[in-house]
Image (spheres, helix red, strand yellow):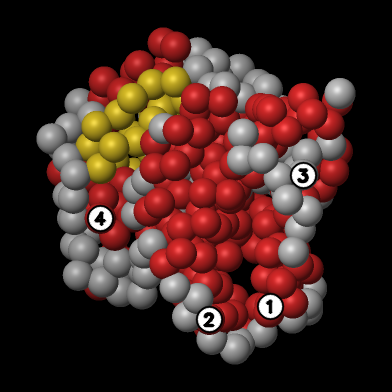
Amino acid sequence: MAQITIMGTGGFGIALAVMCHRYGHQVTLWGKFPEEVATIVKNGEHKKLLPGVPVNPGIHVTAQLEDGKEPDLLILAVPSFAVRETARRAASILRPDTVVANVAKGLESGSHKLLSQVIGEELPEHPVVILSGPSHAEEIARGVPTTIVAASSCRERAEFLQDILSNETLRIYVSDDLVGSQLGGALKNIIAVCAGICDGLGLGDNAKAALMTRGLAEIARLGVAMGADSTTFAGLTGIGDLIVTCTSMHSRNYRTGLYIGQGLSPKEAIERVGMTVEGCLAAASAWELAREHGVDMPIVEQLNLVLDGKDIRQAITDLMGRPSRHENEKIWLKEQRA
């Protein structure tokens, strides 16, 4: 049994708390907003995010961070924009040997940094473990079989998470590719918004399959340019996470795109979803990184333009009208260099 502190009372934080408690761990779930914490305690569930999922009284839900001090494992389960602040706040409660994990999938706005870099700047003595892969909170909380990856530069800490969190409904693989694991998780949200737009417009299966496939090519292209292992994008944090996020109404990124395709403005779509839409936050950072690394990402580029007001149909026309290419991009690149 481990002592686990989870920071964040969103859907994923609650799902992890429920799962960890179910398998015998001592769990403290911290929330920044006292009113939300009090409501969860009173109702025994988060009625908005995970209705029908009981938060067992044995889980200590609190707005006092000191209640979760000196854990064996700290899990940051907050949106990407709150990761730096939350990691900084966590420094006061950690032991030197506390393992720190992060489940947010995004990039830091402005700096475009990976979240492992952000956490490393705030908690330099604690090598971070990134938990990523195809994993809806709604399904983890209900014990649906799920498989994810624990990625870290520190093998010992990745394997610690693998050992204590793996159970009959959660299987964890380890990886040393922090760049690829995080870019796959962050950028698939962008493609999921586009997949929702496809379905909202009623474009059909052909278009959506093409979008997902070429979207993965863009993700891998940028990832390799930033030092990732190309094989990572064929795994759980690449194609696995892309599939689950592009095909499910559980995904707020997909739902946002669906509403845009049905005629809402991006602002109206995000407001209807009512929660952080990581794909819209990450789109600008991904486009900046693409330009910085000299990588072609036309789908990401067009989504940025749509979010800025470009007509969706024109964006599709522009994508379909791009110059012809060889699908094997290495061959095409060799031809271009010749």
Could you give the CA–CA distance between mark 1 and mark 2, rounded to whole angstroms?
9 Å
**What amino acid is labelled 2 in the image?**
Leu
Q: Nearer the viewer, residue 173 or 152?
A: 173
Q: Which residue is mark 2?
A: 201
Q: Which mark is residue 312?
A: 1
Disc with the residue nearer the chain's start (1 vs 3): 3
Q: Look at the numbered disc 1 and give the secondary structure of its residue.
A: helix
Q: Nearer the viewer, residue 64 or 251?
A: 251
Q: Is residue 6 visible?
A: no
Disc with the residue nearer the chain's start (1 vs 2): 2
Q: Residue at x 25, y 42 (%)?
A: 146
- Seen in the picture, residue 16 relative to 37 is either above or below; the reply is above
Q: Look at the numbered disc 3 and give the secondary structure of its residue.
A: loop
Q: Which residue is mark 3?
A: 296
C-beta proximity under 8 Å, tags 1 and 2:
yes
- In the displayed structure, does residue 20 sit left or right of residue 249? left
- Quarter of the image with the N terminus is top left
Could you give the CA–CA distance between mark 3 and mark 2, rounded to whole angstroms?
25 Å
- Seen in the picture, residue 204 relative to 130 is either above or below; the reply is below
Q: Residue 301's x, y, as percent? A: 76, 58
Disc with the residue nearer the chain's start (3 vs 4): 4
C-beta proximity under 8 Å, tags 3 and 4:
no
Q: Which residue is mark 4?
A: 139
**What amino acid is labelled 4 in the image?**
Glu
- Examine the image and state in which quarter residue 312 appears: bottom right
Q: Nearer the viewer, mark 4 or mark 1?
A: 1
- Quarter of the image with the C terminus is top right
- In the displayed structure, does residue 228 sit left or right of residue 8? right
Could you give the CA–CA distance between mark 4 and mark 2, rounded to whole angstroms?
28 Å
**What amino acid is labelled 3 in the image?**
Asp
